[in-house]
């Protein structure tokens, strides 16, 4: 039986907290019912609680006595009447052993168990309920200090977490590859998205990691397009599919863009190849002690040269970079931390400021890359009318853009390619293994029409 490393996660959080005594207390999520009905929302566990417990059920809590290194799980008590509807739960000892705790008690005993520890302080999260502690223990609560140390612990994945992330990526990549084989003119974006969900659930995925994107043609210029309701009616277009699954509460986040027809149009192939070059050069550069924003700048430089070669940009590359011209074609950041949450915590350590420049201002992380951090690498190029209108209105930027050439590529819409990597001691490991080379994609797409 694989045991969730709850105690190790508590210990790392306590180390980051920097205190030698006191109790860490966290509370899990509760079942939520639709207003004026008896229908429950699908349960999603509180991410911070899951990291410290591994429990994916409602009504639980957990605590860690720092001085004695004792991890305590508080289990939701299921009455005999409730068991008729939801089944008989595991025993307290089963829960304790499965999640790596030293003790397990029912949640209604929280106050008496923690009072016996005589804590000097209780470190909790501001958004967690504290009613089970009782009034005397609530007087000891410090809800200001825990969040940042906990987030920092979550930034660095242990081998248990990395193995789950590898499996989540395998499931996601299998689904993307099957979609590449089956996408045809006449399908609807909704069918593409639906097939992805079905394929990942069939392999053990829990649910979508985020609102999946299946964007044909110009819809791909909408970064978070989730309507997914238009027909694929042209084999000259591409479809961008940004979709991941959640496995054991850990996310995958993968994007692939491929032709709706059996091959890329010349314009689509040109833009796609630039994005692929951006991604490959950034992944090759990802290693310990590099700064994440430098990866974004590298991607911009590769894009600038590619767009210069196509004639979409003009002038000198240093001027293009100085004026952040590529930011009008790639308005998002190069990627983000990933883990329990798709956009995982810890991207901006305390005191770190955003860079208020096109593209860079939307970076979801600014920090030094270190071993066991997991990042997405997701360069893209898009032809967004509103953003390009802003570029045209700025003489400093417009001088570097051939807008007649832009018009010739407008129907491309957008291209994004996204992999998930973990930083290693000497470089990185790419967790994402599904086709992305032009020749690979066209070979797969040709079979869709045979």
Image (cartoon, grey):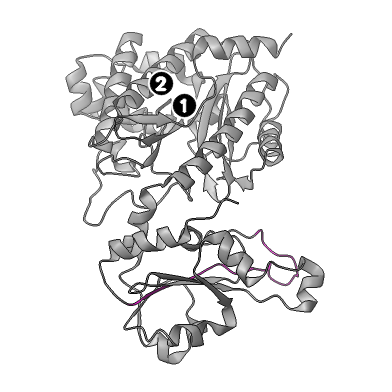
Most extreme residue toward the bottom is 136
Residue 206 lies, in percent from the top left, at 64, 48
Asked if the magenta segment contains residue 204, the reply would be: no
Of 362 and 328, the residue lying toward us: 362
Horizontal side of 99 relative to 228 (left or right) equals left
What secondary structure is found at the residue carrying circle 1?
loop
Horizontal side of 64 relative to 217 (left or right) equals left
Which residue bears the numbered disc 2? 275
Q: Residue at x 18, y 22 (%)?
A: 319
* Magenta span dominant secondary structure: loop
Which residue bears the numbered disc 1? 417
Residue 342 appears anywhere in the view:
no
Measured in 3D between alpha carbons, the distance from the residue under mark 1 to the one under mark 2, in whole angstroms, is 7 Å
Asked if the magenta segment contains residue 34, the reply would be: yes
CB contact under 8 Å: marks 1 and 2? yes
Residue bounds of the magenta highlight: 22-42
Residue 253 appears anywhere in the view:
yes
What secondary structure is found at the residue carrying circle 2?
helix
Q: Residue at x 33, y 23 (%)?
A: 284
Residue 134 lies, in percent from the top left, at 48, 88
């Amino acid at each position: 039986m694989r045991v969730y490393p709850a105690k190790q996660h508590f210990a790392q959080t306590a180390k980051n907290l920097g205190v030698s005594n006191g109790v860490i207390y966290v509370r899990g999520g509760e079942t939520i019912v639709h207003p004026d009905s008896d229908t429950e929302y699908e349960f999603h566990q509180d991410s911070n609680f899951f990291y410290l417990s591994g429990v994916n059920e409602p009504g639980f809590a957990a605590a860690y006595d720092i001085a004695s290194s004792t991890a305590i799980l508080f289990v939701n008590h299921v009455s005999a009447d409730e068991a008729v509807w939801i089944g008989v739960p595991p025993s307290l000892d089963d829960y304790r052993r499965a999640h790596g705790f030293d003790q397990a008690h029912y949640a209604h005993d929280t106050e008496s168990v923690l009072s016996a520890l005589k804590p000097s302080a209780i470190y909790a999260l501001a958004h967690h309920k504290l009613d089970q502690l009782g009034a005397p223990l609530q007087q000891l609560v410090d809800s200001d200090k825990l969040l940042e140390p906990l987030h920092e612990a979550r930034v660095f994945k242990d081998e248990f977490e990395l193995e789950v992330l590898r499996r989540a990526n395998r499931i996601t990549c299998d689904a993307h590859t099957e979609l590449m084989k089956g996408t045809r003119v006449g399908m609807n974006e909704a069918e593409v998205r639906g097939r992805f969900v079905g394929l990942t659930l069939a392999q053990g995925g829990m649910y979508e990691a985020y609102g999946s994107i299946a964007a044909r043609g110009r819809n791909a210029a909408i970064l978070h397009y989730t309507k997914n309701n238009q027909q694929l009616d042209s084999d000259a277009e591409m479809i961008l599919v940004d979709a991941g699954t959640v496995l054991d509460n850990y996310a995958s986040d993968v994007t692939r863009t491929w032709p709706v027809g059996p091959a890329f149009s010349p314009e689509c192939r040109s833009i796609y190849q630039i994005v692929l070059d951006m991604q490959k050069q950034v992944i090759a550069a990802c290693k310990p002690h590099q700064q994440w924003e430098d990866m974004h700048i590298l991607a911009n430089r590769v894009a600038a040269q590619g767009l210069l070669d196509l004639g979409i940009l003009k002038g000198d590359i240093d001027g293009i970079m100085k004026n952040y011209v590529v930011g009008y074609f790639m308005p998002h950041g190069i990627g983000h931390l990933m883990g329990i949450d798709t956009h995982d915590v810890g991207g901006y350590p305390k005191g770190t400021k955003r860079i208020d420049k096109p593209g860079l201002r939307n970076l979801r992380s600014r920090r030094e890359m270190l071993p066991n951090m997991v990042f997405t690498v997701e360069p893209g190029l898009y032809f967004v009318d509103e953003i390009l209108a802003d570029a045209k209105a700025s003489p400093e930027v417009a001088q570097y853009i051939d807008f007649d050439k832009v018009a010739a590529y407008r129907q491309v819409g957008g291209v994004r390619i996204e992999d998930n990597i973990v930083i290693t001691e000497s470089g990185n490991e790419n967790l994402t293994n599904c086709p992305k080379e032009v020749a690979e994609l066209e070979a797969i797409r040709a079979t869709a029409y045979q």
